[in-house]
Amino acid sequence: MLAAVGVSSLDDLFETIPAEVRFDGRLDLPEPAAEADVWRELSGLAARNRPADELVSFLGGGIYDTFVPAVVEAVTSRSEFLTSYTPYQAERSQGVLQAIFEYQTAICELTGLDVSNASMYDGATALAEAAILAAAHGGRPGGRIVVSGGVHPEYVQVLATETHGLGPAPVVIADDGGGLTSAAALRAAVDAQTAAVVISQPSFFGGIEDLAAAARIAHDAGALLIVVADPLALGVLASPGQEGADIAVGEGQSLGNYQNFGGPGFGFFAARKELTRRLPGRIVGETVDGEGRRGFVLTLQTREQHIRRERATSNICSNHALNALAGLVYLSWLGKDGLPALALQLARSAAYLRERLLGVPGVEPYTRGPVFREFAVTLPVAAGDLVAALAQRGYLAGLDLGRFWPERGNTLLLAVSESRTRAEIDAFVEEVSAHLD
Amino acid sequence: MRTLTETPRRATKPGAPPPGIRTIYEKSRPGRRAYSLPQTGVPEVSLDELFPGVARRRRPARLPQIAEVDLVRHFTELSGRDYGVETGIYPLGSCTMKYNPKVNELVAALPGVRGLHPYEPEELVQGALELMDTLSRWLAEIAGLARTTLQPAAGAHGELTGLLLVRAYHEDRGAEPHIALIPDTAHGTNPASVVMAGYEPATMPSDARGGIDVAAVRRFVNEHAGDIACLMLTNPNTLGLFETDIVEVARIVHEAGGLLYYDGANSNAVLGRSRPGDMGFDIVHFNTHKTFSTPHGGGGPGAGPVVVRDILEPYLPVPVLKKTAAHQYTLDYDRPRSIGKVRSFYGNFGVLVRAYAYIRALGAEGLREVSDAAVLNATYVMAGVRDLFDVPYERPVMHEFVVSAEPLRAHGVRALDVAKRLLDYGVHPPTTYFPLIVKEALMIEPTETESRDDLDAFVAAVRAVVGEARSDPELLRTAPHTMPVGRLDEVAAARNPVLSQRFPDDEVAAARPT
Ligand SMILES: Cc1ncc(COP(=O)(O)O)c(C=O)c1O
């Protein structure tokens, strides 16, 4: 082949690189490895971790050990889905495009909103994009984002970081001491400079927020309401759209995706129809070919970076299509009846775990009112100590909230999965009780 | 070449779903189901008791009701209408669609990889942290720079992260420059990222050799002294040409107080041959889904790790990995000058594991061979097709090249038509209409994983299509002819957007007088 292109050595192909920036050394990397050795090394590294599902896990905080049915991988491992690029050539990508269209439909159904994009990186970046959209839409560039203290602290951090160059820092209002948004504090924080109000459903502490009240407060001030939603909670709770939200975003990991040490899952992004032309990222639409045959294409691309460049609504190019496909397969597997049934099961188990834990002397409620799959309690000891002790006993006892707020070092956030049995919960509560004794 | 079989041309009413193409919602039938839920033994409390006073859903989400077999058949049917790297050559310029080794999928599926919760106690995830630390060091070595963050989720996200680092660096010095220089060949994400970081992009022209115009850069920088935040460049650039003046460009920008950002999308050309850090760049992102062979999944996920010079280390996103006295890995959040966080948790770990496996398998020698073969393959294909097109810049190409289909316009044929007709030949077409400075651009990146046979077949397909452009241009203008659908009406899709399933009950509701 060298001869065919008229050079005598591979080095000749790199002559165009000036000598001063040519790298003539050897990269300080390991020797090449055979597949068997790669497998052995990575298996060894993996074996030095304890997967959450080998333990009895009550860890949540945005990533959940929801069961992933076999159909999900059967579909996502199909090479045409796994190894294709963004569907730029529509006629050769009808499968991916139709799947995205079906995904968008599922997200619209869950959120009760009109339009969905094809996915974002994660819940946190989806929130940052929603805030950017809100500031642009309201004609309030530099408008402030008012964030409930019930929003995931990492999401708030990502929002603050990603919008740092665009306007004032987001204002975070403390939760009401029971893991929920205080309507009075929210009303006091919102004014004519506010571009959007952000609230989480359920709150990071697992409590059920009054979205309609938040929508009224936001809309009275001419701001948008952005809801960060747990998609499974939307199997029973009123949808953000129904309650007046303008945008709903969230983390889709627990829809058929593994925990993956936090990524990749996917972010979802849905909005009211009026905001369609400001949405970030890919959107698929239905159309026809010259003979009237139905087909699907990437559409409304004049929003996007490859067309609009510096005037694009976002810089996003690659998204999390395969994870969103897993989400679609999972939601189709659950179906119309399975989603509410699963949501009910999660709520029952969370309620049962909470009731049992609150029966342990010294354990006090933190999250007020009904909860979905997660809730916080305060302990008579440091939450980190309990987590460490129970890890020795085969449990992931939950999330020590001192990680985010030093003053909450005694607060523990616990989540259930639909697989947690009554016997496991009872045994866990016994362990907690023994530890606190 | 594949034999061309004509699909039957059914004439249907516009809008009426033709047989064969039904969405999963249209396959839904009441009472069918795939799901099952585990028995828990937990008391069966009612919704009213669980959620007193809470606003509940008025109607269930209209998810499909479908049996498992029909679910699997549906997606099998869909996948049959797609094309991946495992179907055949995928020479989509700028996208580096190389083959993804299978063992990478296996390691990513290990329970000790995909089963980890990000908030597990650190003692339980030491293997994961070590893997991240090792990969970080490898990427720094490949980049020729000091420290890595694995947090960004894709290339564009890496760009935003890098620009926020630039901002933090200047702010720390009490400076407030607000311009980022970008060549006119840049990918669209570059200017879009600049704006998201709160900077203003300034577009620099290309010179007659297809490189950034150094004189123009010098002039601009002099006219805007004190206002230059950074310059973003990919090298080789999107024309597939090496920016030979890079050292001089770096000097100009650095002397003006600006930093240099390397868009690593084109790293596949220079692995072990030239390092961005040595070229003068301060910040680099890699697209693992291009250079390090993590499959693109029909749009993602990828990963966009960012590597920086030591002066930028204090600003990296939290957490940063470090080793304790007891040789344990720990995640350090106590970084007062950090920009904060750019995504939840630690990045696309499941993707990064694949990149680790890829680099581990190839080692230093293998990575260099990757670039050698990538450049050789591109040069070979270029030699095979160059006489058919206009070649905008007469220079040796690297891992990809751009030609112009402008000569075919005399036959009424455009680059888009060439791409659509190539579909009928069973190959994936190249990128079209990018970079913007080449009219009717065809951007071809064969990648190193294609054999000479595959390259020959691709060249033959391109030659055949250009032959048809001359003899039967209508065949191209109306292509493709063998796909499940003919050329789709994008204008109609945008004019009257149908972005989700229309359900029969919507129509009933819409028809109801209000
Ligand atoms: C030159 C260049 N820069 C940046 C990007 C953006 O990368 P990503 O899609 O990973 O966000 C791409 C990808 O298409 C690219 O080709």
Image (cartoon, rainbow, N blue to C red):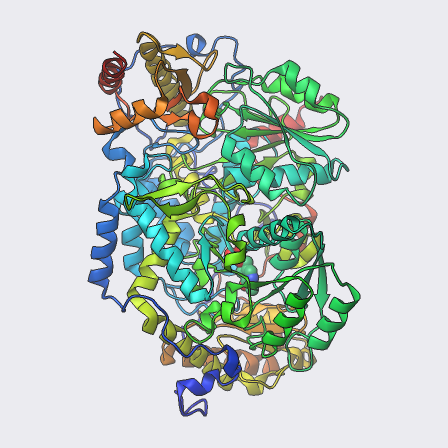
> Which image quadrant: the N terminus of chain A?
bottom left
Q: Position of residue A387 (x, y in %)?
A: 31, 26
Q: Residue B470 falls in which quadrant of the image?
A: bottom right
Q: In which quarter of the image is ligand 1?
A: bottom right
Q: Is residue A89 visible?
A: no
Residue B460 is left or right of residue A30, and the answer is right
Q: Is residue A65 visible?
A: yes
Judge whether A146 appears above or below B239 on screen: above
A289 or B333, nearer to the observer: B333
- Residue drawn at x 58%, y 73% is B442
Q: Where is residue B116 in the image (x, y as percent from the top left)?
A: 32, 39
Judge whether B22 appears above or below B429 on screen: above
Residue A83 is left or right of residue B475, and the answer is left
- Residue drawn at x 21%, y 61% is A37
> Which image quadrant: the C terminus of chain A?
top left
A146 or B508, nearer to the observer: A146
Q: Residue A57 falls in which quadrant of the image?
A: top left
- Residue drawn at x 50%, y 14% is A178
Residue A112 is left or right of residue A78, and the answer is right
